[in-house]
Image: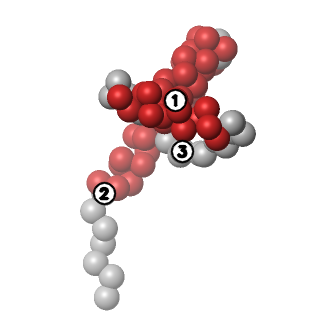
Amino acid sequence: MKKVSVTVQYDEEKLSTIKICMEKKGLNINDEIIKFIDSQYTKQVPAQVRDFFNMKAESERKIISKTNTQPKGDKK
């Protein structure tokens, strides 16, 4: 699955402070933001849409897997 970057504006001092506090607890802000976005995905996207997306992604993975495992002919 292709990844994208998300950019948000936030107070620099607050961000620095939360990073320090989270690191003391062994947490990573990026991991926590991803968990939050994933929870919003689950909360906001209807289950039928998520199921369809999962089936589509699985189908695409199988196609990619098949093309990567097929032997390639010798080209001279």
Q: Residue at x 31, y 68 (%)?
A: 72
Do residues under tags 3 and 1 come within 8 Å of each other at their CB atoms? no
Whether residue 35 is situated above or below residue 59 in the rendered picture? above
Viewer-nearest of labels 3 and 1? 1
| Residue 10 as seen in the image, left or right of residue 62 | right
Query: Of label 3 and label 1, which has the lower sequence position?
Result: 3
Query: Of label 2 and label 1, which has the lower sequence position?
Result: 1
**Residue 57 image point, x, y percent:** 50, 34
- Secondary structure state at the residue bearing disc 2: loop
In the drawing, what numbered circle is on residue 3? 3
Q: Residues within 10 Å of mark 3 (few under 14, many from 20)?
A: few
Q: Find the distance from the CA under tag 3 to the CA under tag 2.
A: 26 Å
Query: Of label 3 and label 2, which has the lower sequence position?
Result: 3
Q: Find the distance from the CA under tag 3 to the CA under tag 1.
A: 25 Å
Q: In the image, what residue type sits under mark 2? A: Gln
- Secondary structure state at the residue bearing disc 1: helix
Q: In the image, what residue type sits under mark 1? A: Ile
**Residue 34 image point, x, y percent:** 51, 30
Q: Find the distance from the CA under tag 2 to the CA under tag 1.
A: 49 Å
| Residue pointed to by mark 1 | 18
Front residue of this view, candidates 53 and 29: 29
Whether residue 74 is situated above or below residue 66 in the rendered picture? below
Q: Residue at x 42, y 49 (%)?
A: 64
Q: Could you tell me if residue 57 is visible in this image?
A: no
| Residue pointed to by mark 2 | 70
**Which quadrant of the structure image shows residue 76?**
bottom left
Q: Residues within 10 Å of mark 2 (few under 14, many from 20)?
A: few
Whether residue 9 is situated above or below residue 45 in the rendered picture? below
Q: Residue at x 38, y 32 (%)?
A: 23
